[in-house]
C-alpha cells in the first residue's frame, strides 16, 4: 500500500459503488464519486460524501432521504478501518475512521519503510527532465535566480520520490548581448577600476561588477553599441579572437554560481550551452517539421517582414485578442530567436529530433555526483534527453514564449508530449520599493545569494553561541550555524506560492521563529533529544493506545504525506512541501506539550508514543533532507 489516506478513500468509494448498484441507481458519467468525497469538517467525522445532492435531481427525492437510504445499506465489515457512518445536515454521509486500527497501519508502515515512506510508482519507467536556474552569466546568483533554482531543485526531488528517473539540466547562455558587453568590458576596462570593490569576492561577483561598469560606459556613449553588435556576431560565428575570451569569462562565472548552488544542496546532471544548441542543428530539424503546419509561416509585409513565426491565434480567444498573436522564431536575418532555440531544445528533451549533442564530464560535484556539459568535441551519450515529462522552471514573464514552445509540440502532432510539458512559472524576488534586480545598474550588489547566506549563517552563529558557548566547540557551532542559516534562506524561497511575488525583507529571510526552516529543524532536533533521554529500545508498543486528539492529528498528517507527494508531482505546487513540513512541526510541538512521552502513565503508552516520535523523526528528515534539500543538525 503506497498511500494510506487514498486507501481509506478507496474503501469508501468501493462501498458506495456497491450500495448504489444494489439500489439500481445509475450514476451519470458527469458525476465523479471521488470528487464528491471530501474531508469532513472538525467533529463531523473524517470524510463526507456529497453524492446525495446531485442524486436528488435524478431520483426526485430529498438529499437527506437518499443519504439515509444509502447509509442503511453500508456494511461496516466492508470498511475495516472505519468505526461508524452517520447522516448529517441536509444530506451528507459522514465516515468516522477507527483510529485504533488505522494508527497501527500508519505507524507500522512508516517505521517499516523508513526513508522510503511516501515513495510512489506513478513515475516508474518514466523519465522527467527538469530545467532550472539558467543564470545570467554576467553576475553571481541573486535571490531571484535562487528562487528559480530552489523551485526546480525541489521539483526534481519530488519527482524522484514519485518514482521518476530525473535529469536536472541547467541552460547556460554563453552568447547574446550580455556576454558581448562582458567581453567588451574585459577588453577595455582596467582591472583596478573594479578590483577594489571586489576584494575577497568570488569571480562571479567580480565579473558582475565589471559588467555593470561596462554597461554604464556603453550607456554613456551610445556610439559603442555598434561595437557591441559586432562582438555579438563574432561570438555567434565562433570567432577565434573573441570566442575563447567569452568562454573563459563565462566559465569563471559558472564556477562561482555553482559554488553558491552547491552550498544550498542544489546539484545538476547536465549543463547545456546555448552555443552548442545552435551548433547541434536541432532547431533546424524542428523547424522543418513546424513549417509543414499552416500555423508556422514567414511574414510577408510590415515591420516583421521576412520573419518566421508561430501563429497562436487558433489556440484560443486570449491569443486572438493580442495585437500580434504570433511569436517570431526566426528573424529576418535567418537567425533563430531564443524562443526558436528553446523549441529545438524541447524537441531534443522529448526525443523528437535526430540531431545530437556531444558531451564531456565537467567535473565532480561536492555530493559525489558527476556533472556533464555539452561540447563541440566530446562524445555521444544516449542517456541524456529521452524524456517522457519536461518541466521548464522559468519566470512568469516568459509565459507566452513557453506557451509557444509547448504548442510547437501540438502543431507537429505530438499530443502526448504536449500534454507532458510544463512551465513551472514563478514571480521574481523584488527589492524593497518595488525595484527589480538589474545587472546593468548593479542593484543586485548586497542582495546576491552569497550575501544572504552569509548573513543568515552569521545570525545563526550568534544564536547557537548564545545557547551553547562553553558546551560546544567553536568548530561545531560554526557547522551548526551553516546548516541553520542556509536552511533558513532556502526555506524562505520555497514557502511562498510561485505565483506570489516576494519583496525581499531581511527580517523575514533571517527569521528563526514561526514559518521558518529553523523552527522545523528544531522539531527534528527535539525528536532526537527525546531518544537521547530514553537511551533504550522501544518495548511492547500498542498504537491503538494513541487516542489523544494531539496524537490523532499527528497521525492524520503522517498518513496524508504520500498523497501530498503525488499532488506535488502532478501539479507542481512546490510550496506545499514547505507548508506541510511546517504543519508536521506544529502538530508535533502540540503533541510534545500536551502529552507526556517519557513520563507516560504506562510502559505500553510510553512505548507507543516513542514510536510516534520515531515516525515524526523519519518524516521530518524525509521532508527536510530529501525533498527540501535542507540539512538537519543533531543539536541546536
Image (spheres, rainbow, N blue to C red):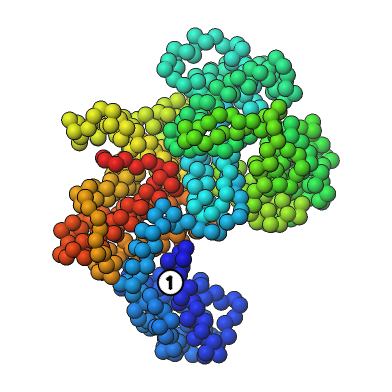
Q: Which residue is mark 1?
A: 8
- Label 1 CA crowd tier, 10 Å (few <14, some 14–19, many 20+): some
Residue 330 in view here: no
> Is residue 311 found left or right of 613 in the rendered image?
right
* Residue 597, percent from left and from top: 20, 58
> Is residue 340 found left or right of 475 in the rendered image?
right
* Residue 140, percent from left and from top: 50, 27
> Is residue 220 found left or right of 566 in the rendered image?
right
Question: Considering depth in this image, is 575 or 545 the residue closer to the camera?
Answer: 545
Could you tell me which quadrant the C terminus lies in?
Answer: top left
* Residue 291, percent from left and from top: 82, 46
At x 68% / y 53%, what residue is drawn?
Answer: 417
* Residue 49, percent from left and from top: 45, 77
Residue 289 in view here: yes
Question: What secondary structure is marked by label 1?
Answer: helix
Residue 215 lies, with reference to residue 60, above or below; the image says above
> Is residue 435 found left or right of 243 in the rendered image?
left
Amino acid at each position: 500500500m503506497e498511500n494510506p489516506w487514498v486507501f481509506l478513500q478507496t474503501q469508501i468509494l468501493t462501498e458506495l459503488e456497491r450500495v448504489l448498484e444494489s439500489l439500481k441507481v445509475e450514476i451519470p458519467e458527469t458525476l465523479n464519486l471521488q470528487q464528491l468525497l471530501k474531508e469532513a469538517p472538525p467533529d463531523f467525522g473524517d470524510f463526507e460524501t456529497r453524492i446525495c445532492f446531485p442524486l436528488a435531481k435524478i431520483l426526485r427525492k430529498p438529499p437527506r432521504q437518499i443519504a439515509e437510504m444509502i447509509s442503511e445499506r453500508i456494511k461496516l465489515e466492508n470498511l475495516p478501518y472505519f468505526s461508524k457512518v452517520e447522516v448529517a445536515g441536509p444530506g451528507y454521509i459522514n465516515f468516522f475512521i477507527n483510529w485504533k486500527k488505522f494508527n497501527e497501519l500508519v505507524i507500522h508502515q512508516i517505521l517499516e519503510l523508513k526513508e522510503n515512506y511516501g515513495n510512489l510508482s506513478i513515475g516508474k519507467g518514466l523519465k522527467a527532465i527538469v530545467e532550472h536556474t539558467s543564470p545570467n552569466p554576467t553576475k553571481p546568483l541573486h535571490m531571484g535566480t535562487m528562487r528559480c533554482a530552489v523551485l526546480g531543485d525541489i521539483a526534481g526531488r519530488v519527482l524522484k520520490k514519485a518514482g521518476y528517473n530525473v535529469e536536472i539540466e541547467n541552460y547556460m547562455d554563453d552568447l547574446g548581448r550580455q556576454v558581448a558587453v562582458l567581453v567588451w568590458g574585459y577588453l577595455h576596462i582596467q582591472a583596478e577600476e573594479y578590483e577594489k570593490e571586489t576584494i575577497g569576492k568570488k569571480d562571479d561577483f567580480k565579473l558582475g561588477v565589471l559588467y555593470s561598469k561596462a554597461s554604464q560606459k556603453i550607456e554613456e556613449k551610445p556610439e559603442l553599441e555598434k561595437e557591441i553588435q559586432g562582438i555579438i556576431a563574432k561570438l555567434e560565428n565562433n570567432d577565434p579572437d573573441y570566442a575563447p575570451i567569452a568562454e573563459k569569462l563565462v566559465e569563471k562565472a559558472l564556477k562561482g554560481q555553482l559554488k553558491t548552488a552547491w552550498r544550498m544542496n542544489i546539484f545538476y546532471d547536465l549543463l547545456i550551452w546555448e552555443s552548442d544548441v545552435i551548433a547541434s542543428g536541432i532547431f533546424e530539424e524542428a523547424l522543418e517539421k513546424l513549417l509543414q503546419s499552416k500555423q508556422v509561416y514567414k511574414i510577408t509585409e510590415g515591420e516583421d517582414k521576412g520573419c518566421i513565426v508561430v501563429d497562436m491565434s487558433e489556440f484560443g480567444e486570449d491569443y486572438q485578442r493580442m495585437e500580434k498573436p504570433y511569436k517570431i522564431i526566426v528573424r529576418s536575418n535567418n537567425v533563430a530567436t531564443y524562443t526558436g532555440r528553446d523549441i529545438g531544445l524541447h524537441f531534443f528533451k522529448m526525443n523528437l529530433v535526430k540531431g545530437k549533442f556531444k558531451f564531456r564530464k565537467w567535473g565532480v560535484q561536492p555530493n559525489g555526483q558527476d556533472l556533464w556539459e555539452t561540447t563541440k568535441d566530446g562524445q555521444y551519450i544516449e542517456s541524456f534527453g529521452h524524456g517522457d515529462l519536461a518541466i521548464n522552471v522559468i519566470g512568469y514573464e516568459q509565459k507566452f514564449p513557453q506557451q509557444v514552445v509547448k504548442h510547437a509540440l501540438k502543431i507537429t502532432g505530438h499530443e502526448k508530449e504536449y500534454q507532458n510539458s510544463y512551465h513551472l512559472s514563478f514571480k521574481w524576488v523584488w527589492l524593497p520599493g518595488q525595484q527589480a534586480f538589474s545587472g546593468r545598474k548593479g542593484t543586485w550588489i548586497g542582495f546576491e545569494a552569497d550575501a544572504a547566506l552569509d548573513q543568515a549563517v552569521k545570525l545563526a552563529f550568534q544564536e547557537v553561541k548564545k545557547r551553547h558557548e562553553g558546551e560546544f566547540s567553536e568548530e561545531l557551532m560554526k557547522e551548526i550555524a551553516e546548516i541553520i542559516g542556509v536552511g533558513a534562506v532556502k526555506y524562505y524561497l520555497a514557502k511562498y506560492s510561485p505565483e506570489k511575488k516576494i519583496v525581499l525583507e531581511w527580517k523575514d529571510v533571517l527569521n528563526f521563529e514561526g514559518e521558518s526552516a529553523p523552527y522545523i529543524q528544531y522539531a527534528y532536533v527535539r525528536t532526537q533529544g527525546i531518544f537521547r533521554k530514553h537511551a533504550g529500545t522501544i518495548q511492547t508498543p500498542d498504537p491503538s493506545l494513541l487516542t489523544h486528539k494531539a496524537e490523532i492529528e499527528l497521525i492524520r498528517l503522517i498518513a496524508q504525506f504520500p498523497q501530498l507527494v503525488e499532488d506535488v508531482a502532478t501539479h507542481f505546487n512546490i510550496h506545499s512541501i514547505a507548508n506541510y513540513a511546517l504543519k508536521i512541526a506544529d502538530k508535533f510541538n502540540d503533541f510534545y506539550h500536551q502529552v507526556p512521552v517519557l513520563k507516560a502513565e504506562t510502559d505500553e503508552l510510553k512505548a507507543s508514543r516513542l514510536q510516534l516520535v520515531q515516525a515524526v523523526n523519519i518524516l521530518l528528515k524525509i521532508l527536510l533532507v530529501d525533498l527540501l534539500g535542507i540539512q538537519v543538525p543533531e543539536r541546536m
